[in-house]
Amino acid sequence: MKKIFIFVLVMFLCVTSFAGGNKKKISLEKWQGKPLTIVCPWAINGVVDIINRSLAVYGEEIFGQKIIATNDFIREGSITLSDNFLLTMSSMLGDGGNIALTNFLKKKANEPHLIIGSENAFAVTPNVRNAKAQTFNYNDFEPIINLCSATFIMMADSKLNITNLESLKAYGEGKNLLVAVGGSTSIESFMVRSLFKELGLNMTVVAYNGANLALEALINKEVHLAISHQSQAKAGVEDGIITPVVLFDEKGSTEGFFAGTKGVGEYGYTAYCKNRSFLLARKGTDEDIIQKLYEGYKRILEKDEIKALFKDMMLEIEPLTAEEIDRHIAEVSTMVKTNM
């Protein structure tokens, strides 16, 4: 009986110790007492901005220190500008986030400052013709973890009666269509250029600093089409203002709000990929910091309320590691070069 009691006691201590270990804060020793700043280089109220701010709420709980989610570098100094001003002055953030990533080179390794990047700057911009000159490259950063993955969707003004690629081709014959995108050297800009080339249609890309602003331009009838995130387009579809045309994926959607919308891969085209947004530190940041940040953000992404948010926003949770992010950049680079 005594042996059984001791065994049960040991098991109880192990279980409670394990449970307590799961709740233990991940200590970032070098940054104790300093807030961790995460910069989103794209538009305020965009998908990635919302995700960045939602994840930052758990800074105290997971790391024992605040996480400040922001969209610009000016706020790090003594001057603070209003969100409204930042929205109207999108050039401050730069095309596709390139200016923000360039500014981030001023940061040093092991500073409590991180930035969000995507395949736009590292796999698209360096490989497309007429790309804006950039002074940074992928090797200037240390990838940490993928925060979210999304599939872009092409939307049309509903009055144009464009509901698929067949009707797009019929409508676009002999015209020059205006297509709004989030950045002239963004992945969505590249994919839609490649698609129109395959369709034999003429188009002009109209660049905005974020997919949400591109969609707003379509709703305001400034353009014929826009490439945006599915969650951002849902309200406009419900109101009958815009219509889904095609998803930039291998296959279309068979369930959910956009069920029945085909993927470009189903038409035989290959210029498509997931849009992934991942955390980056400055090159040379200690590996133990990178690992702790990965572990902490992975725990945040596992929270039920975050899973619910992602589902509502039609996003995927894919906590890719640094090696997997490296592979994604390489694969997208190959795709871009193949479809140029």
Image (cartoon, helix red, strand yellow):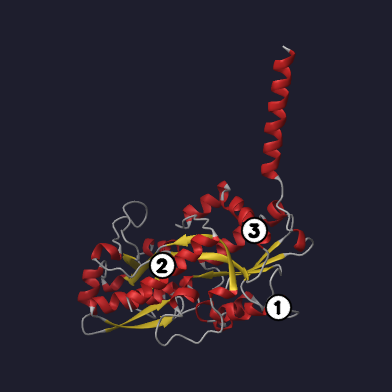
Which residue position holds label 2? 331
Q: Amino acid at mark 3?
A: Leu
Position of 142 with respect to 26 (left or right) is left
Which residue position holds label 1? 80
- Disc 1 and disc 2: Cα gap in Å? 39 Å
Which numbered disc covers residue 188?
Answer: none
User: The C terminus lies in which quarter of the figure?
Assistant: bottom left
Q: In front: mark 3 or mark 1?
A: 3
Which numbered disc covers residue 293?
Answer: 3
Q: Residues within 10 Å of mark 3 (few under 14, many from 20)?
A: many
Q: In front: mark 1 or mark 2?
A: 2
Q: Position of residue 32 (x, y in %)?
A: 78, 60
Element under disc 2? helix
Which of the two labelled residues, at mark 2 and mark 3, occupies the earlier sequence position?
3
Q: Is residue 323 visible?
A: yes
Q: Amino acid at mark 2?
A: Glu
Q: Amino acid at mark 1?
A: Thr
Q: Residue at x 37, y 52 (%)?
A: 256
Q: Quadrant of residue 220?
A: bottom left
Question: Quick one: 22 or 193, which is closer to the camera?
Answer: 22
